[in-house]
Amino acid sequence: MPARFDSLPQRRAIIDRRAIADALTALEGNDAVALRAAGTALLKTALDAGRVEIGRRLIEHPSRGLEIAAAQAFLVDQLIRLLYDFTTQRLYPVHNPTAAERLTVIAVGGYGRGEMAPYSDVDIGFLTPWKQTAWAEQVIESMLYALWDLGLKVGHSSRSLDEMVRQAKSDVTIRTALLEARYVWGDQPLYDEAARRFKVEVQADTVRSFIAEKLAERNARHKRQGDTRYAVEPNVKEAKGGLRDLHTLFWIGKYAYNVSEPGELVEAGLLSRAEYRQFNRAENFLWAVRCHLHSIARRAEDRLTFDMQSEIARRMRFADRTGKSKVERFMHYYFLQAKRVGDLTGVFLAHLDEKFAARGRRFGLPMLGRGRAPRKLHGFVIERGRLAIPSDDFFRTDPVRLVELFALADQHALEIHPLTMRVAARDAKLADDIRQEPRANALFLDVLTSPRDPETVLRWMNEAGVFGRFIPDFGRVVAQMQFDMYHHYTVDEHTIRAIGLLSAIEKQTLADDHPLASAVFDQIVSRRALYVAVLLHDIAKGRGGDHSILGAEVAHRLCPRLGLSDAETEAVAWLVRYHLLMSATAFKRDLSDFKTILDFAEMVQSPERLRLLLLLTIVDIRAVGPGVWNSWKRQLLTDLYESAEEVLRLGHKQKGREERIAAKQANLRVTLGWDEAKFAALLKRMPDSYWVAEPDEVLAQNAHLVDLAGAAQLSIDTRPDPERGATLVSVYAADHPGLFYRIAGAISLAGGNIIDARIHTTRDGMALDNFVVQDPMGGPFEDAMQLKRLRMGIEDALAARGRLVDKLLAKPLSRPRATAFPIAPNVLIENKASNRFTVIEVNARDRPALLHQLAHALFDSKVTIHSAHVATYGERAVDTFYLTDLTGDKISNTTRLRGIERRLLVAASGEKLRTAA
């Protein structure tokens, strides 16, 4: 029995094995089937009662993770012992057993360690001395059926001793499970023989290969989980910095040093006493979180999703503080523990290096590159190819070395020795005294703007705690999460990733994804200012105000300290202040409205700022998380950049509205190759606003659609555009009130997300509406059946076949986790953003058919929608409409605007979903 079971308080309150054994003995009858059913019922009652008691303890002591995990394993132990005795004594007794009729039950995996969450798998093994006998088969089968009847999820194996040895030698997963094997019940000498043979025949002389395989397995697992310990919805068990990383350390220690408890890692010299306390604290906390996850979900659940975070923060008694909610404080503590797990891993591997790594090989982190050992190291030394320090007081004698350590690692492409990282972390507070040192600031700026790999070195600097000490404003966002579904990483991790992306764009390694950004980087004059702006763009988050304004104040204060000139400081402050301007304009405004371009260009004022802002915007969006960047966003930013660059270069009067219309019509004439009469008929039907709004390729597609439709009252065209990552859905139909909201509802029913829409009415009373649609994964609809379903859905909606509202209500919510975030709907009305339209922006919780409901509210308000633009930020949707009244004028009447606002707020809140029959 594990030592931690010994310290488990009031074990009999969890399960009284003696009382249950007596009850099983008292069962009458000889029929094996009936007896097993009756015995299983008794054990099920005991299991349920034990779980209730463990659940009560978890609520009463919500931070005792290891104790709860041990209690669960103890409960299962007692149940298996009772079941084994009942099965071998009452159901299948053997009065004169042969030497072959021996059986032992072992716990393996996490159960073998004596750690289980409430709904963890029960991993057990059945061992026999030789080939399985008929009696052993009966016992094993009966026990497994009983365990399944108890509702337990059982992972099991049945092996002879020879099979155990052979399979453990050939499969590292089996070897790892058996490494933690623990005797539960049955033939004790048989278990002792199995343990001896495992140690002698499997474990001996394979330490080095086992370590290498487990670390390779760990690296692959990290990659599957996103290779960061700072993802805002982490997997508590599998993610980087999670429980499995601690388990890996223990497995390696157990395999290499035969330790039986984590505390023995200190005696083996792998951890100091202080580090073991950190190990224990992190393990205890992570187990508490995992047990709460299982308890709330009532199933095996290891992903710490947003809805779970709020509930666990409450259960674990975190409290709100000024500027930080209880859930943000809970997750901040979680990320600090995950970071501690990473620190311990580095120290642990450094010790293993010294003893077990082959010549020229290491178990540590990968190298930055193929750096050569430099001749001059300013007192630092090279130890087995890694940058190290000659003495324990090296940083104390000259604290600037804390920054120089990372500058040298970057300059010479050297990995830093984990034991040096350990000392740097210990002495990080010395960085407080060198913030004003010009040499220290110059070294830091060299790392930040390095042409090599600034992301990796800055991440090391952050891991050691030096980054946050040297730049205190950055220290305030270390491990700080943003409680929303848009941001995938903590603020510090997001920032470091953005710097890495900027470096990759500069080195032209992302030219396929970002052709424009890669092309303009060479034209950048203020390179240092750009890197510093990326560092500072989110630095003021979590301060209770507008982080753009507060961040600009930080820039004015910090940039001179880093050695930037007045001009560079001004550039950084402007970029931080307006780092959201370009994305907000591109994604939430109509780029075909020339005033949008003019207003944007007036804010930017110079081509250099435009280039800097483009690059900052791209890396900021991409660093949010996987899947956030897409081709459509790239296209919108490119369109805005090119339009604004033209205005800044030539002036807004160079190309008037009439000239632009004439140029588009001339290009279309060439593309179509139509005769003059046919093309003139098309020009006559289309209003001037249509020619301004649509790009050339859409004009050509629309022309073919209108031509093929002839006198038909409805024609639909769907054109996937992989280049833009979306599908153009064009609907040519007889115009009538409510057309737009019906089409929007039909597209939503078909599983599409509308990200842009332009609505046109021809001079002969037809509607020509263009929708840009993506599938739920953010890509284009391309499958033929998908496109057919989309067209049929629109036809049904416009023909009023079935009530659209009923179908929408029946459609299940696709994002139930979004309900974890309180989002108050908001409506913003602008009459200065466009010369021709009233612009209304609606902020609301994203959900299926939101655009349909908002469009219906505008239909009720008797206005004309000319275009709609949809942007989503995780759980938040921002839908922008360009409107006029029914006569084509701006809406200026205050009373009417308030009425529109009220209807949109009701629709945005989801209180009422209705539509015309």
Image: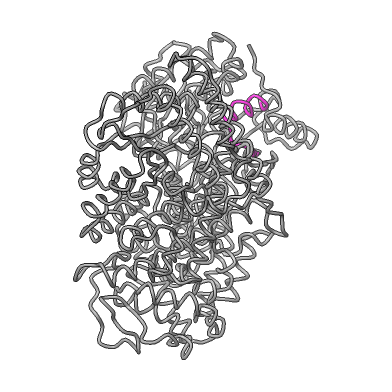
The residue stretch that appears in magenta? 840-858
Q: Residue at x 39, y 32 (%)?
A: 780
Evaluate whether residue 593 shows in this view. no
- Total number of numbered discs in the rendering: 0
Give residue 369's quadrant in the image.
bottom left
Position in image of residue 595 (x %, y %): 57, 47
Position in image of residue 496 (x %, y %): 45, 63
Position in image of residue 696 (x %, y %): 39, 36
Q: Nearer the viewer, residue 480 or 176?
A: 176
Q: Is 385 placed left or right of 559 in the picture?
A: left
Indicate the colouring scheme: one colour
Question: Would residue 854 be counted in the magenta stretch?
Answer: yes
Residue farthest toward the front in the current orientation of the protein: 96
Above-or-below relation of 723 to 542? above
Q: Nearer the viewer, residue 444 or 286?
A: 286
Q: Residue at x 63, y 40 (%)?
A: 13
Give residue 90's quadrant in the image.
top left
Q: Is 819 placed left or right of 434 in the picture?
A: right
Residue farthest toward the bottom in the current orientation of the protein: 397
Above-or-below relation of 742 to 723? above
Q: Is 427 placed left or right of 483 in the picture?
A: left
Evaluate whether residue 163 shows in this view. yes
Question: Would residue 844 be counted in the magenta stretch?
Answer: yes
Q: Nearer the viewer, residue 270 or 839?
A: 270
Query: Which quadrant of the rendered structure holds the C terminus?
Result: top right
Position in image of residue 66 (x %, y %): 54, 52
